[in-house]
């Protein structure tokens, strides 16, 4: 899950920061099923070790 989320973030990392976060958020909303998003929420709640900062910011917007 961490690797997959980070790959998404890396695809958008060259965009301006706000646009990158919005794109990562949109991707997670559009393509990740509910269980995957729940796993991401739980992982971030436990510290989110190893996650790209764009993923952490996007996760907050999913709530």
Image: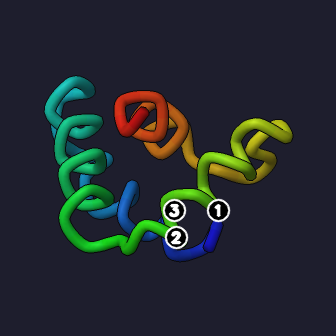
Residue 1 picture location, percent across and down: 62, 73
Tag 3, which secondary structure?
helix
Q: Is residue 31 above or below residue 47?
A: below
Q: Which is nearer the eye, 24 or 15?
A: 24
Q: Are marks 2 and 1 in contact (CB under 8 Å)?
A: yes
**Nearest to the observer: residue 55 or residue 39:** 39
- Which label lies toward us, 3 or 2? 2
Image coordinates for residue 52, horizontal then vertical, percent: 56, 47
Answer with the quarter of the image where residue 18 lies.
Answer: top left
Residue at figure coordinates x 57%, y 57% from the top left: 38
- Using the numbered discs, state the Cα–Cα distance from disc 1 to disc 3 in whole angstroms: 14 Å
Residue 41 x, y percent position in the rendering: 61, 47
- Where does the C terminus fall, quadrant-wise? top left
Mark 2 — residue?
A: 36
Q: Which residue is mark 3?
A: 6
Q: Secondary structure under badge 2?
A: helix
Question: Which residue matches tag 1?
Answer: 39
Look at 23% across and 39% down and name the residue there: 20
Query: Residue at coordinates 64% horizontally, 66% vertically from top-left?
Result: 2
Callout 1: SS:
helix
Label 3 Cα neighbours within 10 Å, binned few <14 / some 14-19 / many ≥20:
some
Residue in the picture at 53% in, 71% down: 35
């Amino acid at each position: 899950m961490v690797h997959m989320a980070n790959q998404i973030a890396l695809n958008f990392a060259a965009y301006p920061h706000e646009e990158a976060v919005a794109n990562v958020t949109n991707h997670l909303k559009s393509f990740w099923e509910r269980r995957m998003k729940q796993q991401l929420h739980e992982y971030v709640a436990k510290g989110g070790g190893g996650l790209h900062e764009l993923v952490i910011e996007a996760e907050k917007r999913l709530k």
